[in-house]
Amino acid sequence: MMIPILLVFPLLAAVPLFTLRSRQAERSVLIAHALLTAGAVLYWAVAGPEEFIGYFRADTGNLLFLALIATVYIAVIPASYRYLEREKVSELWHRIYVVSMLLFVFSMTGAILASNLGLFWVFIEATTLASAPFIYFERHESSLEATWKYVFICSVGIAIAFIGILFLALSAKGVCDLFYTDLIRNAPQLGRFWLLFSFPFIVVGLGTKAGVAPMHSWLPDAHSEAPSPVSAFLSGMLLNTALYGLYRVFQVLDAAGLRREAAIFFLICGFASLLISAVYLAGATNFKRLLAYSSIENMGIIFIGVALGGAGIFAAFLHLMAHSFAKTTLFITAGNIAHRFGTKDIAGVSGLREADRPTGALWGIGFAALAGLPPFPIFISEFLIAREMVTQGRFGLLAAFLLLVTLVLYGMARAAFKMYLGTAPETAKREPPRLIEWLPQAILLLILCILGVAMPDAIRHIITAAGF
Amino acid sequence: MARTLNILLLLFLPFLMLGIINRVKALAGGRKGFPLLQPFFDTLKLLRKGAVVSTVTSWVFAVAPALALAATFTALLIAPGVGRTQVIAFDGDIVLCLYLLGLAKFFQLISALDTGSAFEGMGASREALFSVIVEPSLFIFAGTLALVSGHMSFGELFSLSGGSAWPTVAASAGAIMLFLILLTEGCRIPIDDPNTHLELTMIHEVMILDNSGPDLAFLQYAAALKMYLFATLIAALILPADIPAIHAAFALPVVALLCAVLAGLVESLLARFRISHVPQFLFLTVALSLITLAAAIYFRGGVA
Amino acid sequence: MSQILTILFGVGILYLALTSRMRTYIQVIALQGFILFLLIVRDFGHIDWFTFFFLAFETLAFKTIIVPVMLWRIVERTHVAREADPNIPQFGSIVIGTIVFLSGFAVTDWVSRTDPSVDALAFGIAVSTLIIAFFIILSRKKLITQVMGYMLMQNAVALLMIAMAVELPLLVNLGVLLDIFTLMFLFLLFLGKLHSTYEETSREKLTSLRDQP
């Protein structure tokens, strides 16, 4: 019963907001939705899989993704509250923010819950539409530009994915419909020609949405222009949602005995992403864009992990989870920094250590978590990927991987130290930090640290199950 | 029987096509228009008049109209008529037909240059430019059909067969292409405007400014014949081969008159293109003929 | 008959490659929508009547009427009558368009050898239309033309569906329609905003966000 409730609630709850015209009510709806999502995830974790009208399904395969949505959502709500308060948004834009958030989360939940590839496509396109108002939210010229690029590039990409899905449907014609489970079960009977033909289209299409190079060009713009809590959501969850569908198609090819061919596309995208982020990170002048390039890099690592197979799959999903946590922390913190210093330029920020002690600490530790320093799980996932490369004897890949990851680390560390050390400029606001601004991120980092040191079996099980 | 009919149609149908185009335009413009056979009577009237010949012209100017008409008329005797019968037929007659059209055009061009008028030179240059684009598309198209059918004569050229989509592609792409060429060679809008009064915008009309009397009649008849030639090619392309003779005798005039109606509608709805845009438009014909060639290769699994 | 309709679909897109008028773009998009409607009515009679009705409605009401009207409203609001200076001159466009068609047929030839069940002609024209739509998106500077390119892409996808006789569940079809409708609405909204911000809606204006490596 949780699936219909979770899918209908945001749609129904959005309607009365237009008549109530109360910020209090809008915030309550948002909190209720987040708690409902978290409750649903717990329910599925305990009570087992659930299916709804055949098209939606919650099981161990997508529980990790659903849990990440719930976590990021809960972490983002206090930050949204502070953001809307600080920016003194008008009543209309407050409502637009809340309704868009409801629809955005609705479409992502729908995409993850959908058990049919065609339906997944519908929800993925809907995520673009629902998040467009966020990117335009600050209504500068640059946000308009970013919105246009985001909506247009993603829509074209998603249209390409649709062509791929049509080819996939052709390969499955007479065998089964586009349900993941059917496709994977009947994979050997699928038409191999069309299956292989469809994959590049799906990789390019969903890869656009997942933000991997060379289809990444919308990502830095959109992430830097959106309000910081939304950037956290975009980076921490939207990219994963696109990856989820892509991974399901990858599984179909794997089951059809086309693993080697499919892995090539993933490897190309993965290494291209690492290269692009390594090249552009060093030159980024805006710290939100810096984080965006880091998202490209991490999606690249996840693609490489999936392509390697074996232990790489577990590593990829561990990485995906850890990246969501770390990136959510960093984007929300970046929003606090941008507010305190009044700029998104790296050059304009220094002395975080003294200006705002908790934010500074979060920024430093968050970067450590993202950079893969122990005890954080990204260390484990990157280590596992490197070890898998050694096991498979791919030393060329290993060398390229380590070199590029190190370059990215250098670019990020340089900017992080520059912002953390030094003395704060006179223009920085001196107001004391508030609990609501740093506590959620601190909890996220704490959980991440615990997961890195001693992962509970239940969570290890969920991550492993996402790969099957 | 069919041959006699072919020749009879040659005498009237071209004029009737002009009349119909004019009538369609008139009706679309809310006018009544002149009688359908008025172009025919105009030509008869011109034949009875004398000619004024400029003193600066040479023998070229004198023989060109007659030569142009003779060449065009012969070309039409080769072209497929009623039921795809030809008056003159031999293997390779396509080449002769197309080159006769080229010959007629050549004499018209040099006769226009012969007058020494700047306007006529300009018209001749434009006409030459357009022919340069249109002619390759005709040759590619005819060549494709010849390769596919294995014949070099108009009579058998159009027997499209084999391959799933090939006959339809060839017929529809070819018909569209031939219609565009009909508009170009017939000097119709959107390439040329036969009713214009400004020499600067003329193409065909400006080339015959200095001709008068029977010469003018010859040239106008030749122009009408050329338009009719493309209508017969369209008819041969889209009409099935195995219809009874009596039906075929009606089918050809019907197709030709439909082409005239369509041309009239195009003239009523479109404005003339800027001269600089015309070559782009004409390149569409080359594109279509190349696509027909590609369809021949891919849909028939080879051209042999 | 359906072959002739398909060829008309292709000639329309070829004509687009050489035109620069927004009006023509919209007319061709509407014509393609109508051709799709006819093809659906002709070839899809055997599927269940509800899906059939939906597809016919989608192509006739949405693709033939609503989308062109919306596009026309954008054109009127932004006062863009024609694509002034494309990156690649028009003459080059039609040469490229022809080459695309030739290669589209080559791809079709390869595909139809492997899987004879596909309608080769419609498949070839759909693939060519897709590539030309991409070409329009990449080579034209006006944002409105890029939106037209996107709609051409959607038409090509619909033709592809017909060529391959692939049927998606009704729920999916409905969702797709809703998405694309909302997307058109967003395009309309943001093009209006862009127009009032920049006076001219050209890609060249959107260059403030970029990084140096």
Image: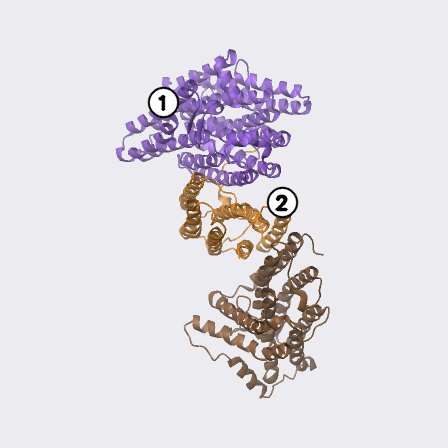
Chain colours: A purple, B brown, C orange
Under circle 2, the secondary element is: helix
Q: Quadrant of residue A429?
A: top left
Q: Which residue lies at the image location 51% right of the left edge and 55% below the top edge?
A: C20
Mark 2 closeness class: few <14, some 14–19, many ≥20 residues within 10 Å = some
Q: Amino acid at mark 2?
A: Val
Q: Which residue is mark 2?
A: C111
Is residue A418 visible in the rendered structure shown here?
A: no
Q: As rendered, which of C121 and A177 lies closer to the eye? A: A177
Mark 1 closeness class: few <14, some 14–19, many ≥20 residues within 10 Å = some
> What chain is tagged by disc 2?
C
Could you tell me how many numbered marks the image carries? 2
Find the residue positioned furthest to the right. B91
Q: Is residue A208 above or below residue A60?
A: below
Q: Amino acid at mark 1?
A: Leu
Q: Are marks 1 and 2 on the same chain?
A: no
In which quadrant will I find the N terminus of chain A?
A: top left
**Of tags 1 and 2, which is closer to the observer?**
2
Lateral position of residue A309 relative to residue A289, left or right: right
Find the residue positioned furthest to the top. A454
> What chain is tagged by disc 1?
A
Q: As rendered, which of C80 and A38 lies closer to the eye? A: A38
Q: Which residue is mark 1?
A: A35
x, y percent for residue B287:
61, 57
How far apart marks 1 and 2 lie (CA) works out to 51 Å
Lateral position of residue B269 relative to residue B207, left or right: left
x, y percent for residue B151:
71, 64
Q: Is residue B283 above or below residue A108?
A: below
In which quadrant will I find the C terminus of chain A?
A: top right
Lateral position of residue B207 relative to residue A142, left or right: right
Is residue A160 visible in the rendered structure shown here?
A: yes
